[in-house]
Amino acid sequence: MKIALTLLLLIMLLFSSSSIAKQSQDDSQNNLNSLDWVGTYIGTLPCDDCKEIQKRITLYEDMTYEIRTEYIGSKTPTDLIQNGVFEWSKDGSYITLKIDIPNLKPFKYKINENTLISLNIKSEVDENSVKYTKLTRIE
């Protein structure tokens, strides 16, 4: 009787731990549904021949984006606008912005609460990653 009870408890423990692992995996895959990712994010990048580059990335609910890049302090003010679509990674940990410019790799960003973080070609955060902060209102 004790052996049967011990065996039953062991089986229940195995099933509950796999259920917890599955729930944890599902949570990481639900950034699309769990985070308030729609909105405009702003960040600055260094610039060799201007004061700074200000980049605004707007993510829309229909999985499209707009990037507005402004070269601040440049001799010839430049304001570039790019539009396109993006998709979530299969594991839900980052998004990829599709770019229609030849020889330019797609941009990848990790989405956290109220922030975007640029990722490298290996989809990782590194020393060159830029953090974009979500605007609470459109300026």
Image (cartoon, rainbow, N blue to C red):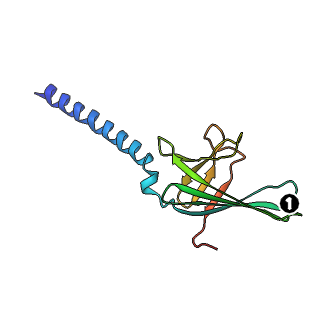
Which residue is located at x 23 percent, y 31 percent?
Answer: 11
Q: Quadrant of the N terminus?
A: top left
The residue that appears at 60% across and 68% down in the rendered structure is: 135
Eyeballing the image, is 122 above or below 30? above
Q: Which residue is mark 1?
A: 50
Residue 45 relative to residue 8: left or right: right
Q: Position of residue 13 (x, y in %)?
A: 26, 35
Residue visible at 48% across and 45% down in the picture: 92
Residue furthest out toward the top: 3
How packed is label 1: few (under 14 Cα within 10 Å), some, or many (20 or more)? some
Which amino acid is tagged 1?
Answer: Cys
Quadrant holding the C terminus: bottom right
Nearer to me, 39 or 43:
39
Residue that appears at 54% across and 47% down: 94
- Quarter assignment of residue 125: top right
Count of numbered circles on the image: 1
Closer to us: 97 or 124: 97
- Circle 1 SS class: loop
Q: Which quadrant of the view contains residue 126?
A: top right
Where is residue 31? Give x, y as percent.
46, 52
Q: Could you tell whether 78 is left or right of 95 in the image? A: right
Residue 88 position in % (x across, y down): 50, 47
Given residues 138 and 81, the one toward you in this image is 81
